[in-house]
Image: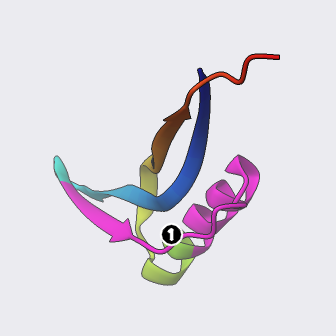
Amino acid sequence: MTVKAEWKKTGIYLEHDLGEGKTRRRTFNGVNASATDDKIAEFAEIIGKLTGENVVKIKVTRTEELSASPAVSE
């Protein structure tokens, strides 16, 4: 059996420290499939600068759909 993974979507979740034990979570969807970890970290840094809030956690979710096809006999 051959299994193939097809990318469906990627999302980014940023958690910001607001001080006094408070946090804010921002969600970004529609992220390009070829986004590297470095680019995602750079994006999080830019968002932190724009909002003035310290980003303390970055989570990335990648959704793929697996499809299987029977093995071909020779």
Q: Quadrant of the C terminus?
A: top right
The residue drawn where x is 65% and y is 22% is 71
Q: Position of residue 17 (x, y in %)?
A: 32, 55
Residue range corresponding to the magenta coloring: 23-46
> Observer-nearest residue: 19 or 10?
10
- Relative to 35, is 54 on the left or the right? left
**How many other residues sit within 10 Å of disc 1, few (<14), some (14-19) or many (≥20)?**
some
**Residue depicted at x 24% and y 62%:** 24
Please give the name of the residue rendered at 61% of the width and 38% of the height, measured from the top-left corner.
4
Q: Which residue is mark 1?
A: 48
Q: Secondary structure at mark 1?
A: helix
Most foreground residue, 50 or 14 = 14
Using the image, determine if residue 34 lies above or below residue 38. below
The quadrant holding residue 49 is bottom right
Task: Determine which quarter of the picture holds residue 46.
Answer: bottom right
Query: Residue 54 at what x, y percent from top left?
Result: 44, 59
The three-letter code of the residue at mark 1 reads: Gly
- 14 within the magenta span: no
Residue ranking furthest to the bottom: 50
Q: Residue at x 43, y 80 (%)?
A: 51
Magenta residue check for 29: yes
**Residue 35: x and y, percent?**
69, 61
Please tell me which residue lies in front, 14 or 54.
Answer: 14
Left or right: residue 65 versus residue 3 is left
